Amino acid sequence: MTRTLKALLALTVLLGAPLSAHADLFGFRLGPKVAFTRGSGDVYKGFDQWLGSGAELGVEILFIDIFADFFFMGNKQYLATANVGFDTTFGDDFRVTVGLYTGPMFYIFPKQEADELDVPLDIRQELESAGVNVDGAIEAYNDASEEEAELSRLAFGWNVARLRLEADMKIAPVVYFGLQTTAGFHFIISGEEVAAGAKGNAIEKAALEYRLTAEQKQTLRELVGARDVDVDNLNGVNYSIGLYFRLEL
């Protein structure tokens, strides 16, 4: 063993207490937080504001870190995540913590007014000549539109991998104040996309039943707002940076 290596080993032993990484066997934490949160995709564009305020609740059991956070993002707009993973902390009164997590995400938006289907006369005549019961289709669509409006309020996602970095300091016994930043790779699908996809499937069934032409089928798709779910558009990234107070026991 070289002198340099011996010296480094000795220094590590001497400074090991404040510099060593550690994780808790059991722990509980709770506190308010604020964060700028952004991400790719239409769901994040739907928020009125970037800055959200909320809280975090977490537990650590046998080195496994589990936490949930919740943010108010504007007028009846909310973002919540649930996370499970592992973290490592360096330091005591001043700490740096690095963690890697996975888990679901939930988005809630204000309810939109349900749109009633209005079929222009020329299109109605064309569809009826093909044997389509247009009035029955309109009634069925309007009955389902309220459920679709409720579904469109929601979006669901999954953080495949979410990295979190924290730096905080103890300001009182069991109380910490710190800076937190996260970055995640996610898959997200909105309730609106689910509803649009369901409409598309209904149009496909109607097209087979009534032997509609490709043009007639496309006309129906445009009328009801049907579209296929593009799997390639479901993935993306999200990131945040913010401040927190935390009570830890």
Image (cartoon, rainbow, N blue to C red):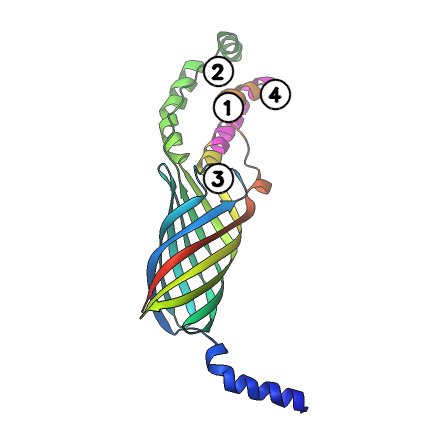
Residue at figure coordinates x 33%, y 58% from the top left: 31
Determine which residue is flagged by label 2: 132
Q: Give me the disc on residue 43.
A: 3
Viewer-closest of 235 and 224: 235
212 in the magenta segment: yes
Residue 224 in percent (x, y) is at 48, 23
Determine which residue is flagged by label 4: 214
- In the rendered view, tell whether residue 149 sits above or below residue 135: below
Q: Could you tell which of marks 3 and 1 lies nearer the N-terminus?
A: 3
Residue 165 appears in the picture as rendered? yes
Q: Which residues are magenta?
A: 196-217
Q: State the CA–CA distance, disc 3 to disc 1.
A: 30 Å
The amino acid beneath tag 1 is: Ala
Q: State the CA–CA distance, disc 4 to disc 3.
A: 31 Å
Residue 211 in percent (x, y) is at 56, 20
The amino acid beneath tag 3 is: Val
Q: Which element is circle 1 on?
A: helix
In contact (CB < 8 Å): disc 1 and disc 2: yes
Residue 51 in percent (x, y) is at 43, 45
Q: Could you tell which of marks 4 and 3 lies nearer the N-terminus?
A: 3
The amino acid beneath tag 4 is: Ala
